[in-house]
Image: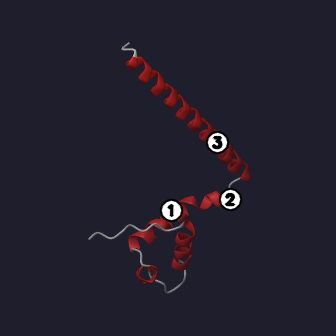
């Protein structure tokens, strides 16, 4: 029977990555302790280092991101409404055999 795939929170991943920086701590020890694979921990460390610069970015970029997310949500609602209208029109066209 296949194992169920676990989903780890970002906070948990950060904790494990920070623990990996401790002297005399191996990835295998962490893997056993936290019941995850060494490969997961290696991937989390890589992601951590690739994205560490984000901690020093300008907060204004966060405002831009929030604004874009809001606009995206609004556009998704509009798209859903247009899909509903399109389906309605297509049903009516079929009913009228056009």
> In what element is the residue under mark 2?
helix
Quadrant for the C terminus in the image:
top left
Q: Is residue 79 left or right of residue 74?
A: left
Q: Which residue is mark 2?
A: 56
Residue 96's place in the image compared with 54, above or below, is above
| Residue for point 60% across, 40% down | 72
Residue at the spot of label 3: 68
The residue closer to the viewer here, 7 or 41, is 7
Q: Which mark is residue 22?
A: none
Q: Position of residue 76 (x, y in %)?
A: 56, 38
Q: Secondary structure at mark 3?
A: helix
Q: Does 26 sit above or below residue 48?
A: below
Task: Give the quadrant of residue 1.
Answer: bottom left
Which of pointers 3 and 1 indicates the residue nearer the eye? 3
Q: CA distance from mark 1 to mark 2?
A: 16 Å
Labelled disc at residue 47: 1
């Amino acid at each position: 029977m296949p194992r169920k795939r676990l989903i780890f929170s970002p906070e948990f991943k950060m904790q494990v990555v920070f623990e990996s920086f401790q002297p005399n701590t191996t990835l295998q020890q962490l893997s056993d302790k936290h019941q995850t694979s060494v490969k997961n921990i290696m991937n989390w460390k890589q992601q951590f280092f690739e994205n560490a610069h984000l901690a020093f970015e300008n907060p204004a970029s966060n405002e831009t991101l929030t604004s874009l997310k809001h606009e995206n949500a609004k556009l998704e609602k509009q798209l859903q409404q247009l899909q509903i209208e399109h389906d309605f029109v297509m049903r009516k066209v079929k009913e009228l055999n056009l």
